[in-house]
């Protein structure tokens, strides 16, 4: 079989191409070079899917590592370009130059890219970038086949379903992300996958950075009574933050009663018991009836945007609780991968005053 180096952007774009190559006398080595992808959790999920499919096909995958800062320097000044514009061309050149260099150094004479399978890309730009990259090295050819033709686009959709691939809703970079429009179900599913690849250390580091920013906020400094939450594994972690400020702030936690949240005073970790609905630690004792002294509410969510829009888990607990605290400042907290350009909302969703 003839060997070819296949620059791969994601598993959905790769499946049909790899299948076609194996059926037509080519053995691809997969080269995963995508420093454009944002956030890092998105990069990890896409790489995992590519690695899973490569392993199933008995193929080697080469990880070119992730340097988003270098990519940002490459496209500096082109941030406002539209999709399929000048920024995309520079992005393709950077990634395909890396592919061509690896090909030249490892005995390949032919390379191509799955970028041409994507509906968000222009064939002529990919060909231009690939041929330019190939020209930088002797004896190297860019295979400019249009990977959307010959039934491959239809087969692409079939393989996505067969393999249950994570199928992203945007090209990959933060600038293309602005055009993404998820519905609530899609957004929740996507974010669940992104959080699933975060390590405990990453969650702890991002949580610490979030609380540091909150501590610099005057609203937090002025507040003495704060409604917060006891975090689950996929939320910004709260226990250490609560313990740090427990001697100078009065904290309250939500408790699930039926379809609603009630507020209870937090009197220390030793007083918490697993809740009946989700086993989330909750304070014992009676609900607090007068909430007027609570001036800050720290709210978790599945996703937030820069306008303060929030999407929860779908049960509406906070959307029913927050109207009882109209006087309190509402601060949304989330990991970086939970920040969307535009959160899908409806009339029942309560907006945050700010998001950290």
Image (cartoon, rainbow, N blue to C red):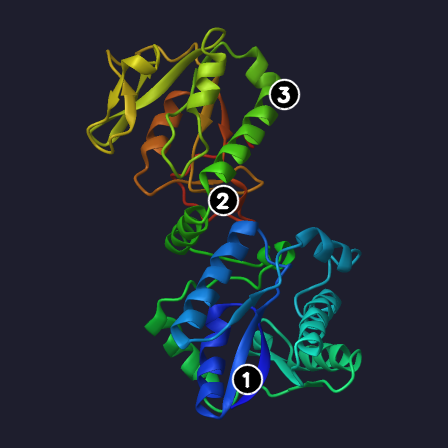
Sequence order check, earlier mark of 1 and 3: 1
Residue 23 rendering spot, x and y as whole percentages: 44, 90
Is residue 10 left or right of 73 when viewed as pictured? Answer: left
Which disc, if any, is residue 248?
Answer: none
User: Which residue is drawn at the image coordinates 41% and 52% (left, top)?
Assistant: 193
Q: In what element is the residue under mark 3?
A: loop
Q: Residues within 10 Å of mark 1 (few under 14, many from 20)?
A: many
Question: Contact, CB < 8 Å: mark 1 with mark 3?
Answer: no
Q: CA distance from mark 2 to mark 3?
A: 22 Å
- Residue situated furthest top in the rendering: 247
Comparing 315 with 121, the one in front is: 121
Question: Contact, CB < 8 Å: mark 2 with mark 1?
Answer: no
Sequence order check, earlier mark of 2 and 3: 3
User: Which residue is drawn at the image coordinates 35% and 20% (left, top)?
Assistant: 253
Position of residue 287 relative to residue 21, above or below, is above
Q: Is residue 119 in sight in this rendering? A: no
Residue 86 rendering spot, x and y as whole percentages: 75, 68
Q: CA distance from mark 2 to mark 1?
A: 33 Å
Q: In what element is the residue under mark 1?
A: loop
User: Which residue is drawn at the image coordinates 41% and 14% (left, top)?
Assistant: 251
Quadrant of the rendering where the C terminus is positioned: top right
User: Which residue is drawn at the image coordinates 44% and 46% (left, top)?
Assistant: 195
Which disc, if any, is residue 216?
Answer: 3
Q: Which residue is mark 1?
A: 147
């Amino acid at each position: 079989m003839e060997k070819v180096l296949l620059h791969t952007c994601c598993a959905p774009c790769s499946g049909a191409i790899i299948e076609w190559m194996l059926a037509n006398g080519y053995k691809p080595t997969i080269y995963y070079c995508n420093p454009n992808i944002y956030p890092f959790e998105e990069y990890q999920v896409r790489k995992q899917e590519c690695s899973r499919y490569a392993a199933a096909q008995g193929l080697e995958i080469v990880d070119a590592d992730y340097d988003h800062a270098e990519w940002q320097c490459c496209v500096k000044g082109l941030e406002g370009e539209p999709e399929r514009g000048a920024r995309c061309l520079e992005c393709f050149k950077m990634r395909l130059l890396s592919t061509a260099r690896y090909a030249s150094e490892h005995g390949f004479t032919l390379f191509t890219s799955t970028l041409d399978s994507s509906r968000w890309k222009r064939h002529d730009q990919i060909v231009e970038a690939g041929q330019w990259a190939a020209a930088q090295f002797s004896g190297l050819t860019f295979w400019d086949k249009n990977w959307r033709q010959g039934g491959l686009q239809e087969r692409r959709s079939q393989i996505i379903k067969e393999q249950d691939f994570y199928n992203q809703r945007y090209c990959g970079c933060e600038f293309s992300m602005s055009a993404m429009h998820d519905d609530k179900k899609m957004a929740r599913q996507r974010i669940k996958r992104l959080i699933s690849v975060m390590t405990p250390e990453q969650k702890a580091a991002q949580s610490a950075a979030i609380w540091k920013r909150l501590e610099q906020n005057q609203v937090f400094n002025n507040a003495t009574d704060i409604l917060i939450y006891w975090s689950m594994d996929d939320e910004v972690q709260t226990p250490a933050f609560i313990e740090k400020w427990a001697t100078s702030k009065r904290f309250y936690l939500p408790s699930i009663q039926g379809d609603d949240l009630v507020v209870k005073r937090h009197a220390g970790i030793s007083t918490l018991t697993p809740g009946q609905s989700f086993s989330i630690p909750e304070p014992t004792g009676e609900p607090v009836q007068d909430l007027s002294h609570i001036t800050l509410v720290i709210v978790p969510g599945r996703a937030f945007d820069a306008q303060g829009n929030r999407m929860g888990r779908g049960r509406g607990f906070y959307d029913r609780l927050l109207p009882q605290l109209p006087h309190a400042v509402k601060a949304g907290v989330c990991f970086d991968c939970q920040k969307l350009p535009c959160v899908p909302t409806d009339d029942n969703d309560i907006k945050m005053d700010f998001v950290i």
